[in-house]
Structure formats: C-alpha cells, structure tokens
Image (tube, grey):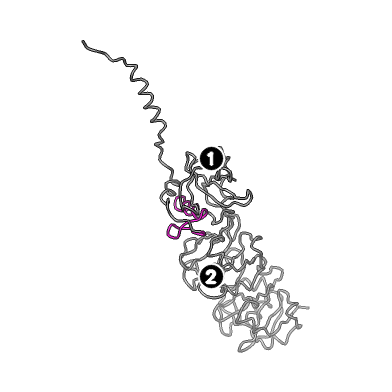
C-alpha cells in the first residue's frame, strides 16, 4: 500500500528556512565601507593618514573618503564634524561618520558606520577594527554627533580671488614659472592677484611676506594668503591662497596647482602667518597714478624713450605729468629732482615723484602703500613695492611733489 506523507509536515520547515534566509544579510557593502574594510588590521598611529604609516581616526576617515569620493576632507576632527549634514542618531546609515567625545565637550574620535550596529575605525589598542556601537557601553555613552558627507567641503566660489585661482588647478609646477603655462608658488600668487584685482605683488615669497596686512589665523578669510617657512629652503619659502573650508590653493613643488588643508601636519609645522592684500590696489584717486597704471606691462623700456613706443625712466615720468597735468618736466632725472617741493617719506601721497638712486637717479611715480610705478630695463613699465624690494628699497633717495599751481 502506498503511504502518502502529509504535506503539513514540511510547511513549518519551509517557513523556518525562509525566515533564516531573510535573517541573512546578503547586501553588498557600499563603496565607503568596502574601502574601509580593506584596512582592517592596519596599525594605529597618532597623526597617521595612510596605510603605510598607520591611521588615527580622522586620518582614516580622510583617507577613505578621498579614495572613494575623490575629495579630501579636513584633517582634524574639529573640522570634519563641520562637514556635510547632521544626522539624528536613530537615522544613521551605512557610510555616515560618527563622532565621539571622552569629556562630552571636545570631539576626540571618529568612526565610519557600517550598518547592523557596527563601526569601523582605528583604536589605539587594535588598529583598524570593527566594533559594536549601541551594544557597546563605551561607544554608545560617548556618542556626540553623526554626519552624512556626500559633497566636498564648501569653498568661497563667490570670492573673485578664489574663483580666479581655481581656474589654474592642474597647471604644472615649474621653479621660476609665472605664467599659466607653469607656476611656482609666488609666481602663481602674483599672477592671480594682478589678473583678478589689479594688485601688483612682489615676485618672491619673502618679498610678498613684507607687504600687506598681517592677519591672525582665526580671522582668516577667503582670498588671504598663507605663508610657510623652511619647506625647500630656510626662511619663508612657500605660500597659497585660502579658499575656505580649511583649504588653500597653491603651486606645489611636488605636484601642480592643487588644494591642500591648512590642518595637515606638514603645513601646521611649516606655518608662518597670514597676509591680506586687499588694500594694495593701485590708487584711483590720483589722475597721475591712473595714467601711469595704464602702461603697466604694456610699454617696454627704450633707451631715450619718451613716447608710448617705449620709455626710459625719466621719459616715462615726463610723459605722464604732461598728459595728465599739462606740466612740462625737465627731460632728465637730475633736473627733475630740482623741481617741486621736498616730501618726507612718511608724508608721501599718490602722484608724488619718488627718486631711487642706483648708478644714476631713477624717478618713479608713487602709487600708495609703498608702491611705485616706474620703468626698468627688464620689465618696462612695472610696479615695485619699495619697502619689500631688496634691490630698490635701500636705494630710496627722496621724493618731490609737483603741482600745476
């Protein structure tokens, strides 16, 4: 006789199998978690930002996001916690960054949430490891905030200097470079400020440091310039433009025009100060200065030149005064020195004539802020900051004020 097994015997077993399958997480980890998992076991290293040297928590988060998202987060916990969107504790998802504090005030640690109550992060005892979050009394009690970071840190794109500098991202580095074909650091700074704001800075980092207004780091604004010392040589040797979000843009000797974080250990160690150059624009109050500035970079030096075909030093000053004031100055510098009223250096105003003595007297038109517009054989009509210039600064001879009255 054929025996039929009752089908209800198999129903509970089938249901149990389905339930078990449902309980197994077959989901593929997202790219952030997948990248983070590759570094399980990497040693903990205070200040570490790369697998080869080990990681601390903020260095680990920075590295993973750069590898996956293609943008750099700030290096410090204090800046990372300002990025992205704050997420409620109950809404934390895979790939979010979770922050902790030992004292309930200052953030002291970060981790990447993996889902299923798991965190991946470097710990001092075990290096990069996976731990529980809510089930762990320690991590649960020390939680302070979670952030979802999907976009790069904001930069001040509405700032003219920042926007102008960003156009040159990727331009190669070349020592001595000062054109969009290739830049060195100070050549990049000089070019951007002149092109965007008609601010004429000296050519070298140490001379640029001697100009402008010094600003405390906590008061830095987009468009300010950061200076660093003892990079490839002793003394002030590198600079870059602050663009917001804790970043600056610079012509890097090891790369190209790129962005970096001020908070990086290397730049913190080399940091010297911040300068603001916004007040260094050529004065527009003096018709003499306005006329002189028209020819900056446009008219070459020409021995004996007195026209816009080319100028020598005295010929340039003679031409500008006649064009703007109808004043006929003598042809040569030593004769021009005999004209007008003597002016002390501290009393200079735009439009005065400054005399610089090299092998012979060189007249120049004072443009304010220790800057003069003058002619040199190398550059033609150019701008020099005589306070910052190692060559022209010591050659200051005197100044005259010449008026039509």
- Of residues 348 and 256, the one nearer the viewer is 256
Tag 1, which secondary structure?
Answer: loop
Q: Is residue 208 above or below residue 134?
A: below
Instruction: Check disc 1: other Cα within 10 Å, few if <14, some if 14-19, many if 20+.
Output: some
Q: How far across and down, in percent of the image, does residue 58 sit?
A: 52, 54
Q: Which span of residues is magenta-colored?
A: 46-70
The quadrant in which residue 384 appears is bottom right
- Of residues 259 and 139, the one nearer the viewer is 139
Q: Residue furthest left?
A: 1
- Of residues 233 and 199, the one nearer the viewer is 233
Which residue is found at the position 52% from the left and 40% from the top? 135
Instruction: Check disc 2: other Cα within 10 Å, few if <14, some if 14-19, many if 20+.
Output: many
Q: Residue furthest right?
A: 405
Does 336 appear in magenta? no
Q: CA distance from mark 2 to mark 1?
A: 53 Å
Q: Is residue 385 left or right of residue 266?
A: right
Q: Which mark is residue 134?
A: 1
Q: How far across and down, in percent of the image, does residue 8 sit?
A: 34, 16
Q: Which residue is mark 2?
A: 187
């Amino acid at each position: 006789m054929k025996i039929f097994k009752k089908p209800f015997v198999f129903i509970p077993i089938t249901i149990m199998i389905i339930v078990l399958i449902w309980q197994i997480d077959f989901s593929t980890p997202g790219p952030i978690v997948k990248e983070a998992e590759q570094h399980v076991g990497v040693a903990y290293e205070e200040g570490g930002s790369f697998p080869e040297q080990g990681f601390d928590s903020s260095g680990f988060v920075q590295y993973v996001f750069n590898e996956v998202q293609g943008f750099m987060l700030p290096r410090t916990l204090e800046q990372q916690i300002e990025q992205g969107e704050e997420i409620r504790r109950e809404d934390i998802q895979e790939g979010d960054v979770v922050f902790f504090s030992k004292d309930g005030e200052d953030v002291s640690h970060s981790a990447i949430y993996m889902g299923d109550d798991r965190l991946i992060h470097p710990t001092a005892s075990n290096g990069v490891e996976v731990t529980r979050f809510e089930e762990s009394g320690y991590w649960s009690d020390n939680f302070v905030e979670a952030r979802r970071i999907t976009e790069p840190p904001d930069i001040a794109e509405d700032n003219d200097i920042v926007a102008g500098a960003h156009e040159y991202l990727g331009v190669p580095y070349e020592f001595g470079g000062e054109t969009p074909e290739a830049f060195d650091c100070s050549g990049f700074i000089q070019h951007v400020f002149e092109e965007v704001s008609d601010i004429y800075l000296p050519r070298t980092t140490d001379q640029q440091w001697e100009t402008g207004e010094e600003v405390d780091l906590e008061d830095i604004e987009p468009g300010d310039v950061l200076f660093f010392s003892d990079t490839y040589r002793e003394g002030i040797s590198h600079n870059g433009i602050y663009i917001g979000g804790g970043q600056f843009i610079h012509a890097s000797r090891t790369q190209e025009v790129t962005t970096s974080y001020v908070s990086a250990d290397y730049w913190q160690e080399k940091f010297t100060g911040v300068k603001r150059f916004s007040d260094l624009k050529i004065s527009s109050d003096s018709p003499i200065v306005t006329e002189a500035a028209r020819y900056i970079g446009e008219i070459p030096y020409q021995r004996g030149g007195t026209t816009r075909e080319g100028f020598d030093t005295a010929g340039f000053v003679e031409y500008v005064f006649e064009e703007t004031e109808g004043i006929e100055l003598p042809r040569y510098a030593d004769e021009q020195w005999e004209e007008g009223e003597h002016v002390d250096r501290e009393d200079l105003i735009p439009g005065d004539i400054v005399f610089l003595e090299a092998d012979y007297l060189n007249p120049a038109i004072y443009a304010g802020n220790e800057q003069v517009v003058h002619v040199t054989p190398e550059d033609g009509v150019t701008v020099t900051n005589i306070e910052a210039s190692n060559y022209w600064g010591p050659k200051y001879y005197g100044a005259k004020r010449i008026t039509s009255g």
